[in-house]
Image: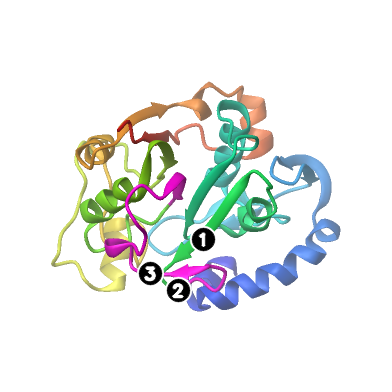
Amino acid sequence: MFHFLLRTIPRPILIKLSLAFQKVSPLLYAGNRYEDPINGKTYRKFLPYGYSGRAERNNVLSPGTMSLERHRLLWLYLKEKTDFFTAPYKMLHIAPEQCFFKIFRGMKNLDYTTGDYNSPIADVHFDLHHAPFEDNSFDVIFCNHVLEHVEDSAQCMRELYRIMRPGGWGIFQVPIDITRTETYEDKSITSPEERAIHYWQKDHVRLFGLDYKQKLEEAGFAVTTDDYAERMPAELADRYRISPSETIYLCRKER
């Protein structure tokens, strides 16, 4: 059922429906087997999630925040490995995730701007190939699960580097096929059905491989990869429903 809804309902409508669902989910999924670290609440189970092209994943979508494995991992990483929640930062959040949007907006240490091509919760609507910001504008940039959608990922990476301040940092997660040493991209694959098969999702235009770090470095970033999830105790990863295979890509602009 969720698989069908994700494939057929436009994203702005899905966002509105999920906001309504969040109001009743604590009662529908009451329990203490699993925990969402973003809101600190527990549930008897999480929801399934998946798009055409990949098998639906069971027990991964939080009923409370609508967070997925990668969102909960990022939250824990930010809490334990960065000063994101305390240091004063001017921040740009591209394609803002619903599970973070209100929390980040309310953080007094952040000068927080959201941007997206068409998201209804974005402050600024723009094409990432030509970001409408001056050089060296932001201390922190989040741009997660975006670069697999854009026409020219190298150009977008250069734009992210351009608008980041020297000394700034960002996290730019993407789906990665760890069985590939090189990113897979074929301009002749244009139909949604073919893209779902080759790139895991109908609106993806490439599938990044293990050369993703190199591509970020070519744009100018100093990149640190952190296998934070893999080092997490198995019982904790299961309680939070986090995939141990996801690597954090922390990107810095050194000068």
Of the numbered discs 3 and 2, the one sitting upstream in the chain is 2
Quadrant location of the C terminus?
top left
Q: Residues within 10 Å of mark 2 (few under 14, many from 20)?
A: some
Q: Is residue 251 left or right of residue 30?
A: left
Residue type, label 2? Asn
Q: Is residue 106 left or right of residue 3?
A: right
> Would you place residue 6 above or below residue 221 in this image?
below
Measure the C-alpha gap from mark 1 to mark 3.
11 Å
Of the pair 80 and 89, the residue shown nearer to us: 89
Image quadrant where residue 150 sits:
bottom left
Q: Secondary structure at mark 3?
A: loop
- Rendered residue at 64%/37% (across/down): 85
| Contact between labelled residues 3 and 1, with CB atoms less than 8 Å apart | no
Image quadrant where residue 254 sits:
top left
Image quadrant where residue 213 sits:
top left
Measure the C-alpha gap from mark 3 to mark 2.
8 Å
Q: Is residue 101 highlighted in magenta? A: no
| Highlighted magenta segment, given as a residue range | 119-144
Q: Is residue 122 left or right of residue 34?
A: left
Quadrant location of the N terminus?
bottom right
Q: Which residue is mark 3?
A: 126
Residue type, label 3? Phe
Which of discs 2 and 1 lies nearer the camera? The answer is 1
Q: Which residue is mark 2?
A: 118
Residue type, label 1? Thr
The answer, for residue 3, to whether it is visible in the render is: yes
Q: Secondary structure at mark 2?
A: loop
> Would you place residue 89 above or below residue 225 in this image?
below
Q: Which residue is mark 1?
A: 114
Residue 108 in picture, x, y percent from top left = 69, 47
